[in-house]
Amino acid sequence: MRVIILTQYFPPETGAPQNRLWALARGFAKRGARVTVLTAMPNYPAMKVMEGYRGKWFMKESMDGITVHRAWIHTSARGGMLRRLASYFSFVLTSLLAGLKLPRADYLLCESPPLFLGWSAWILSRLKGAKMIFNISDLWPESAEKLGLVKNRTALGLARWLEMFLYRKSFMVTGQTQGIVDNIAGRVSGPQVYWLPNGADFPDHGKAHDGASWRREAGYGVEDFLFLYAGIIGHAQGLEVVLHAAKKVPDGVKFILLGDGPEKERLVNLKSEIRADNVAFMDPVPKTEMPRILAGADAGIVPLRNLPLFRGAIPSKIFELMVMKKPILLGVDGEARRHFIDRAGAGLFFTPGDTEDLSARVRDMIADRAHMREMGLNGHAYAREHFDRQKITGAFYSQLEGALHG
């Protein structure tokens, strides 16, 4: 089986889509597929092309035996929708040019967002004789509209037309959550709609990580109670709820917001304004450093804004916490709550965006450390049974093999 993965985001960048697609590429290659990745010069989340990739239009490299083709992308560290669109469309063009040189394939899997990359995917799939798989990790433009990021009605209408066009032209549409799958299946007929969830990597042999030394290095004491958020600091997360709740919790409770994103500067200013001195901001770290930091935290916090849109969301950071057997404070209602609170018993739920509810759940959690450990173990067992990435990849590979030879 020959597979092309087309994505704007890929390692050495760090982040949810990068980790997920890298795992998919390696999993397919280990099962015998010939995998080619077409991606942008790495630049996320700083929006600056990384050292070693600058000043190049196109390049090819090998990563763990997988051929990776990279194409130039316009980047700007300054925010704004117009600059983001310029970045998206620059890669649509350069990916199409770079893709002309790729070999023929059986499948071309395109990661969305950005939705516009579907143009390149559709054209290349036709040129390469490949069945197009459109992989949806976020319902765009719906999410952009609900978050107020795009307000122009004409632009939204064109984006909705493109979304439906790409769904109809796909052999298969895959969704990261059951909510995404149900949404798409209810709007389009023709392509197969398949649930391809995110998941976690569970090593065969557990490895101990020295979280205690990380706590000391970071300046935290044994008695400090650390809640960790690690991920994009963006509009969707609504992280101001953490800063306001931090003013209402007992002494010794500390919050760490690790990551980067368009909302970070505003939240750093808010911290100073309200004097939330028990909140610390940390810059992103290499993926290899994260297990040590997770081991040093007492619990994780996973919030999203209180929007109906997010009732079908499952933030990927949940799985990283569960691998490390950490309980979670979950501010995401709907699908994530059903899986990880109601069924798994992996943590406590707080109403998204509700400062009082979050601070109350913090007090509940720190009051019973034995229950905390139990919740961490519950989450680990549930994720291992239902969200093991190896099982997910194997099932998807079998699905495509069957369609190819059936």
Image: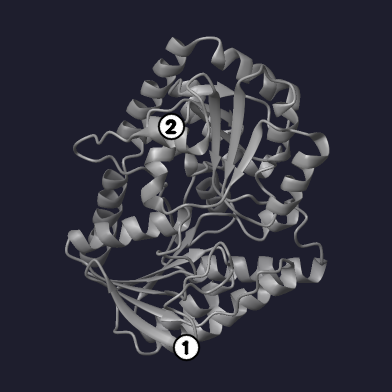
Q: Is residue 9 above or below residue 145?
A: below
- The residue that disc 2 covers is 296
Quarter occupied by the C terminus: bottom left
Percent x, y of residue 327: 47, 25
Q: Going from the N terminus, do you reach mark 1 or mark 2 first?
A: 1
- Describe the colour scheme in one phrase: one colour
Residue 203 screen position, x and y as percent: 24, 41
Q: Identity of the amino acid at label 1?
A: Trp
Q: Helix, strand, or loop for circle 2?
A: helix
Graded by Cα atoms within 10 Å as few (under 14), some (14 to 19) or many (20 or more), the crowding at tag 1 reads some
Query: Secondary structure under badge 1?
Result: loop
Which residue lies at the image location 71% right of the left edge and 72% below the top edge? 158
Front residue (pair 34, 365): 365
Q: Badge 1 is on which residue?
A: 57
The x, y position of residue 146, in whole percent, is 74, 51
How far is disc 1 from disc 2 in space, using C-alphas? 41 Å
Q: Is residue 268 visible?
A: yes
Closest to the observer: 367 or 4? Answer: 367
Amino acid type at mark 2: Gly
Q: Quadrant of the N terminus?
A: bottom left
Residue 174 visible somewhere in the drawing: no
Q: Nearer the viewer, residue 166 or 379?
A: 379
Determine the residue positioned at 47% across, 31% down: 297
Give above or below for 265 relative to 150: above
